[in-house]
Image (tube, helix red, strand yellow):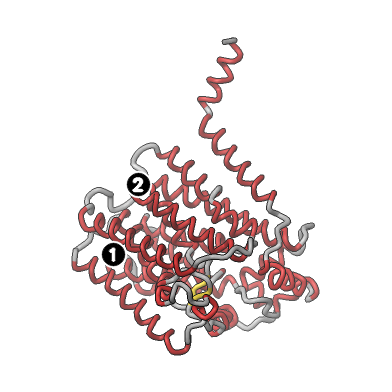
Amino acid sequence: MFRWERKVLEWVEKHIYIIAFAGVTILGGVIRMSLRNHVSADAESSLLPWYNMIVKGGQIQALKYQVGNYNLLYQFLIVVMTYLPLNPLSAYKLLSCIFDYLLAGAMGWLVYTMAEKEKVWKFLAAYSMVLLSPLVIANSATWAQCDSIYTFWLVLTVLFLLKGKFIRAFVFFGLAMSFKLQAIFLLPFLLLAYFCLRKFSVLYFAIVPAVMWLSGIPAFLMGRSFRDVFFVYQFQVSDSGKMSYHYPSFWLLFCSENMDMHRAFSYPYSIYKTAAILLTLCVLAAWMILWIYRKVEWNGQNLLYAAFLLTYTTVLLLPAMHERYGFAYEILAIAIAFRNRKTFPLLAMLTGMSILTYGNFLLARQVDYYGLACINCGVYLAYCHVLGKEMSVSGKEFSNTF
């Protein structure tokens, strides 16, 4: 071996973390760039027409009107993107992909904070798993959806709550709620933390609407009503009319395997929705009562497990769930896998199920939703068994604070 070769290899070995981080970062960008021209049905029917409405409405002046069904903060960011030399599709995708990187960094930070050894490698692994996840790539770079944006803030919410930084946690939750209503799936966890930790006041929940209101200031200055930041979600909820919007939920178990799935998604929603919501609340309450009965120690590990299980429960049992609504708990499952290696196969199954449902829209692929619903419920029960059992016996294995 030549002397220069030895020096090169020594340099590579010394800087392997930086090289690996840079390689993953660049690779993630190259993959996303290769998908920049894919136009999804949602982009064609909704996102691109909304973008044109903003441009025709005078860009910043268009904030005085409700465009699409996103909240004021996201609409403001799209307004900002209209001033950049980008085509509309690239603008949407660039914004979401920026948050892909932020989400990957936040997950790496969470895993790094949890790790007891090999912290840097685990940060790099978690960062890579998010950034190169087919689910994340398909959501933002292919579909042009924005789920990575609100999920980034949710991951920070969990991280800072585990750190005991409660004001920051609620600020981040308020930002998540400012982008998308689906952030509310983390609310049961925050209520659990309030009741069981008893380290912050109920008044902290008022931070959330305050942050949401502040996020609407650019639109308020353009003439929007102060109430619009909240009322836009009322429209989204009232717009629902099916028990499932292609999410493999618990309710699809009541379909025949040979049943027409259009009919399956269109159960008499007005009849069953109340029962479905009440069942969801009962199961969430049952989890909390069980943990209180078992006197679970609310250390960092168990709080993380509870955040994941309560969010998963909420999406699995609520009616009118879309195929992308599991995005937040699927990302949290990555942190769970680093804490409990037994769940890596379950994480792979979660990702695989979502990729199949995404394929129904992105690639016009036929999907057996009844079969996926069976698998999804099975994966949920497996997580309940593995994590629930560990929560009851491993209270002293993880420190109370990070």
Asked whether 351 or 103 is in front, the reply is 351
Residue placed under numbered mark 2 in the picture: 341
Compared across the picture, whether 17 is left or right of 288 comes to: right
Helix, strand or loop at mark 2: helix
Considering every residue shown, the one lying at the far top of the view is 2
The residue depicted at 40 percent of the width and 66 percent of the height is 374
Of the residues tagged 1 and 2, which is closer to the observer? 2
* Residue at mark 1 to residue at mark 2: CA–CA distance: 27 Å
Image quadrant in which you'd find residue 230: bottom right
The residue depicted at 28 percent of the width and 69 percent of the height is 287
Percent coordinates x, y for residue 137 in the rendering: 59, 54
Asked whether 303 or 46 is in front, the reply is 46
The residue depicted at 49 percent of the width and 78 percent of the height is 264
Asked whether 6 or 59 is in front, the reply is 6
What amino acid type should be assigned to the residue bearing mark 1?
Leu
Task: Give residue 197's mark.
Answer: 1
Query: Closer to the N terminus: mark 1 or mark 2?
Result: 1
The residue depicted at 22 percent of the width and 58 percent of the height is 392
Q: Is residue 198 above or below residue 103?
A: below
Percent coordinates x, y for residue 271 in the rendering: 44, 89
Compared across the picture, whether 157 is left or right of 104 comes to: left
